C-alpha cells in the first residue's frame, strides 16, 4: 500500500533548490530506498510552496525524474515513486502486441496532472447556470493570444473528432464536393465520407498542399477546402507562412468557398500555425484540439473563425450537447496558463520527438527512407502494404495502413507507425526497426518464416 511523503520531511533533504538539484536529491532518496516504490510524493504546488520556488521549477524536476523512470504520475494516485530501472527485471517488456503502433494516442505518462486544474475549474463563474456559454471568458482569454488570426466568433466542442465533424458539416452538405489535401489523416476522410460529402484530392509536398494542385481542384467547383496546417498526418510537415499566403492567393478568386484548418495536435506541435485565416478570416474555421497535449478527460477543442461558420457549428451541435461544461473549459484554461504545466508540455513534446526521431534514424540506418518532421506517426514506404502488415503482425507488431490516407487506392504503398507509445529503450526501438526494415525490403511472407 502506498503512503504519502510528508512535505516537510522531503524539504529537509533538498539542499539545492534548482530543478536539477531537486531531481538529484529525490532521485537519490529513491535509489537509496528511503522513498520505496509506490510512495506518493507531494503535489507540485505543495512542494514548490515549501521550497519557496516556482511550480515550474518543481515540474521541471519531476519531468527529469520521469525521464529517468523514477516516478510516475497517475490522475487518481498522483505522483508516485517507481523502483529504480537497474533493480527491475530486464525482461519486463510486455511485447509489441501491447504497444499502440496504430492510433497515435497520447502517452498517459506524459500528460499533466489534473487535480489543480479541476479545482480551478470548479471556481468557474455562473456554476450550474442555464445560460449557453459557447466558450467561457477564461478559456477564450487563454487561447486568444495563441490564435494565428483574429476570429469573429468562438465555440467549444467535445474533442478534435467532433470539431472536425462539425466544421466539415458546417461548410458542406451531403452530395457537395470538398477539396481535401492528399494524403491526409484517415479520420478527416472518414468524417467527410460519413457526412455524404464528395471528395477531390489536392496533392501535397514537404510544405503542405501544392498551390497549383489546389487551383486544379478548384476547376471542379468544390464548396470548401480542408487541410492540416501543422504536424500533418502522415507527412509531419508544417505549412509555412509563404505557402499559406500562396494558398490564400489561389482561394481569393473563389469568394464562395470556405476553408477548414484541422489543427489536431494543437499545442503539442513543435511549430506555430501559419494560417490562411491571416489572409481570409471571413471564410475560415480553425479547429484546434487540446486532447493530445492535455489528455482526453477534458474533451477540449476550440473552433473559431468566421461568424456565420461558427454559428453553423453551434447549430449542428445543438442536436446534441449545446455547450461544454464550464468546469472543464476553465480547467483547460488553467492548464494553458499554468507555468508548471507549460514545463511538462515542453518536456512531453521533447520526449515524443525523441521517440519519433530515434525510430526514424534506426530505420534510415537500415536503408528505409523516412523523415521525422513532427507529430506522433512515421510514414514508411513498403513494396506492398498488405503483405508488410501481415508480416509484421506475425511478430505482434500491428501498424496502420497507409492507403487509408488517400481518397482512392494509391500507386505507392506505405504503412503508418504511431510513435507516441514507443519504449524509451534504444535497444527495443532497434528491434522494431529491424522488423520494419525487413517488411519494407521484401514482400513475400516466406521471407519472415
Image (cartoon, rainbow, N blue to C red):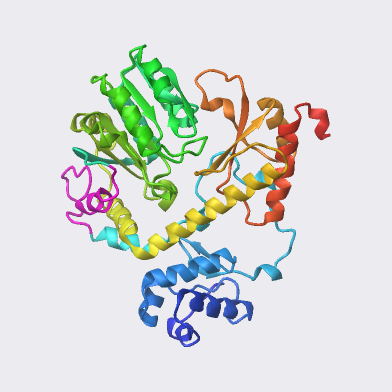
- Residue at the extreme top: 220
Q: Is residue 190 magenta?
A: no
Determine which quarter of the picture holds residue 279: top left
What is the chief secondary structure element of the magenta stretch? loop
Which residue is rendered at x = 20% and y = 38% of the image? 153
Query: Looking at this view, is 22 or 298 the one in front?
Result: 22
Query: Looking at this view, is 308 or 134 the one in front?
Result: 308
Which stretch is magenta? 124-148
Would residue 279 be found to the left or right of residue 273 on screen? left
Q: In the rendered view, tell whether residue 82 sits above or below residue 256.
A: below
Q: Is residue 319 visible?
A: no
Determine which quarter of the picture holds residue 161: top left
Would residue 424 be found to the left or right of residue 184 on screen? right
Residue 327 in the image, given as x and y percentages of width and height: 28, 54
State the quadrant of the N terminus. Answer: bottom right
Residue 313 in the image, given as x and y percentages of width and height: 26, 31
Residue 87 in the image, given as x and y percentages of width and height: 70, 71
State the quadrant of the C terminus. Answer: top right
Query: Looking at this view, is 132 or 386 the one in front?
Result: 386
For the image, the number of numbered tags is 0
Which residue is rendered at x = 55% and y = 41% of the image? 377
Residue 11 in the image, given as x and y percentages of width and height: 45, 84
Q: In the rendered view, tell whether residue 118 sits above or below residue 140.
A: below
Which residue is rendered at x = 49% and y = 69% of the image? 62
Query: Looking at this view, is 302 or 320 the one in front?
Result: 302
Which residue is rendered at x = 63% and y = 25% of the image? 413
Would residue 214 be found to the left or right of residue 133 on screen? right
Q: Is residue 405 visible?
A: yes
Would residue 287 be found to the left or right of residue 233 on screen? left
Amino acid at each position: 500500500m502506498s503512503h504519502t511523503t510528508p512535505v516537510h520531511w522531503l524539504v529537509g533533504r533538498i539542499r539545492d533548490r534548482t530543478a536539477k538539484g531537486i531531481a538529484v536529491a529525490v532521485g537519490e532518496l529513491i535509489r537509496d530506498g528511503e522513498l520505496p516504490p509506490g510512495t506518493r510524493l507531494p503535489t507540485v504546488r505543495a512542494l514548490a510552496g515549501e521550497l519557496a520556488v516556482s511550480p515550474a521549477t518543481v515540474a521541471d524536476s519531476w519531468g527529469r525524474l520521469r525521464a529517468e523512470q523514477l516516478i510516475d504520475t497517475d490522475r487518481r494516485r498522483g505522483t508516485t515513486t517507481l523502483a529504480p530501472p537497474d533493480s527491475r527485471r530486464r525482461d519486463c517488456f510486455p511485447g509489441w502486441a501491447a504497444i499502440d503502433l496504430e492510433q497515435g494516442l497520447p502517452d498517459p505518462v506524459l500528460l499533466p496532472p489534473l487535480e489543480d486544474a479541476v479545482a480551478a475549474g470548479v471556481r468557474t463563474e455562473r456554476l450550474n447556470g442555464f445560460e449557453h456559454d459557447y466558450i467561457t471568458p477564461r478559456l477564450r482569454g487563454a487561447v486568444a493570444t495563441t490564435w494565428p488570426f483574429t476570429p469573429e466568433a468562438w465555440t467549444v466542442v467535445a474533442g478534435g473528432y467532433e470539431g472536425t465533424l462539425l466544421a466539415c458539416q458546417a461548410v458542406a452538405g451531403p452530395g457537395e464536393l470538398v477539396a481535401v489535401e492528399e494524403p491526409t489523416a484517415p479520420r478527416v476522410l472518414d468524417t467527410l465520407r460519413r457526412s455524404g460529402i464528395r471528395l477531390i484530392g489536392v496533392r501535397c509536398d514537404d510544405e503542405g498542399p501544392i498551390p497549383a494542385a489546389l487551383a486544379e481542384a478548384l476547376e471542379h467547383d468544390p464548396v470548401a477546402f480542408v487541410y492540416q496546417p501543422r504536424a500533418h498526418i502522415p507527412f509531419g510537415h508544417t505549412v509555412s507562412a509563404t505557402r499559406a499566403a500562396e494558398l490564400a492567393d489561389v482561394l481569393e478568386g473563389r469568394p464562395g468557398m470556405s476553408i477548414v484548418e484541422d489543427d489536431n495536435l494543437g499545442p503539442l506541435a513543435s511549430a506555430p500555425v501559419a494560417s490562411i485565416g491571416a489572409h481570409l478570416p471571413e471564410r475560415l474555421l480553425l479547429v484546434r484540439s487540446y486532447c493530445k497535449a492535455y489528455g482526453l478527460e477534458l474533451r477540449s477543442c476550440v473552433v473559431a473563425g468566421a461568424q456565420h461558420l461558427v454559428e453553423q457549428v453551434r447549430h449542428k451541435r445543438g442536436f446534441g450537447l449545446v455547450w461544454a461544461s464550464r468546469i472543464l473549459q476553465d480547467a483547460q484554461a488553467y492548464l494553458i496558463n499554468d507555468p508548471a504545466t507549460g514545463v511538462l508540455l515542453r518536456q512531453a513534446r521533447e520526449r515524443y520527438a525523441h521517440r519519433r526521431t530515434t525510430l526514424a534514424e534506426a530505420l534510415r540506418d537500415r536503408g528505409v527512407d523516412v523523415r521525422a518532421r513532427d507529430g506522433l506517426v512515421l510514414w514508411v514506404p513498403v513494396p506492398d502494404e498488405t503483405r508488410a502488415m501481415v508480416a509484421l503482425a506475425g511478430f505482434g507488431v500491428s501498424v496502420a495502413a497507409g492507403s487509408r490516407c488517400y481518397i482512392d487506392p494509391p500507386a505507392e504503398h506505405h504503412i503508418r507507425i504511431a510513435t507516441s507509445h514507443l519504449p524509451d529503450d534504444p535497444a527495443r526501438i532497434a528491434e522494431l526497426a529491424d522488423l520494419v526494415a525487413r517488411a519494407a525490403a521484401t514482400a513475400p511472407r516466406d521471407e519472415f518464416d
